Amino acid sequence: MTPLTKVSSVAVALIRDNIDTDIIIPSREMRSVSKKGLGDGLFANWRYTDAAARIPDPDFALNRPKAEGAQILLGGRNFGSGSSREHAVWALDEFGFRVVIAESFSPIFYGNCIRNGLLPVVMDPTPLARDGLLIEVDLPAQQVRAGGGAWSFDIDAEHKDILVKGLDPIGMTLELDAQIRAHQLRDNAARPWAWDVLQQD
């Protein structure tokens, strides 16, 4: 995964409560188990006047010119509720979002964000919902800064470490390589017969 430290960007504001994963990526848009090819289906029911023909709705927030290149999404309470589909996070990521700021998140969606390199920031996003406002999200400092203001946010230390280092599950395991090797040496000394069997295989 790409390490995440600071993100500076304008934001797209979708501050509505209970935006669930079926709104984020409708089930008909999930045509494979791949992480690729989902960005076009992001918010498809809201983003297009005709989703099948991909005719954009010019009034929808993601389609406005000021949203181009935005890496920060502002949501409402209980963002990412509903089913546990990881495709919702994959679609947000492929579209270009690195941060979602919302008053609260579904726990499963929150965990999916962390495991896929997307930072979920729990705070009231309304002070940030101003057109053209440049927002800086500083993960190491755990701060959001914009328009001369600064807001602190909480994040679990392990989650922060995963995002800052860009660790996927394999990378997290490799972080423990020294402890794993030390355990193997101790176990080999205590149970050499078990290791003899493994070496024969």
Image (cartoon, helix red, strand yellow):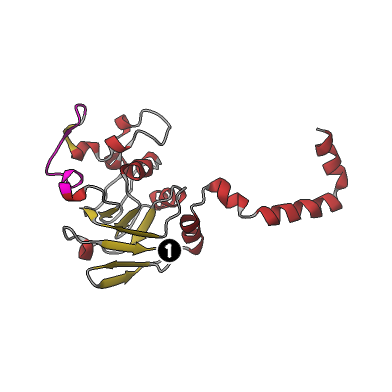
Would residue 138 be found to the left or right of residue 174 on screen?
A: left
| Vertical arrangement, residue 157 with respect to residue 52, above or below | below
| Image point (57%, 52%), residue name | 172
Q: Dividing the picture into quarters, in which one does residue 63 lie? A: top left
Would residue 156 be found to the left or right of residue 131 on screen?
A: right
Residue 170 image position (x, y, % from top left): 57, 46
| Vertical arrangement, residue 35 with respect to residue 162, above or below | above
Residue 174 image position (x, y, % from top left): 62, 50
| Image point (33%, 35%), residue name | 38
Residue 2 colored in magenta in the image:
no
* Nearer-the-camera pick, 81 or 124: 124
Q: How many marks?
A: 1
Q: Which residue is mark 1?
A: 155
* Nearer-the-camera pick, 35 or 9: 9
Would residue 56 be found to the left or right of residue 11 on screen?
A: left
Local SS, label 1: loop
| Image point (75%, 54%), residue name | 183
Q: Dividing the picture into quarters, in which one does residue 121 lie? A: bottom left
* Nearer-the-camera pick, 33 or 84: 33
Residue 114 image position (x, y, % from top left): 44, 52
| Vertical arrangement, residue 150 with respect to residue 184, above or below | below
| Image point (45%, 54%), residue name | 3
Residue 36 image position (x, y, % from top left): 38, 35
Residue type (three-letter) at the residue carrying disc 1: Ile
Would residue 196 be found to the left or right of residue 34 on screen?
A: right
Q: Residue furthest left?
A: 59
Magenta residues (range): 52-65
Q: Quadrant of the C terminus?
A: top right
Count neighbours of disc 1 (C-alpha within 10 A) and say few if under 14, some if 14 to 19, many if 20 or more.
some
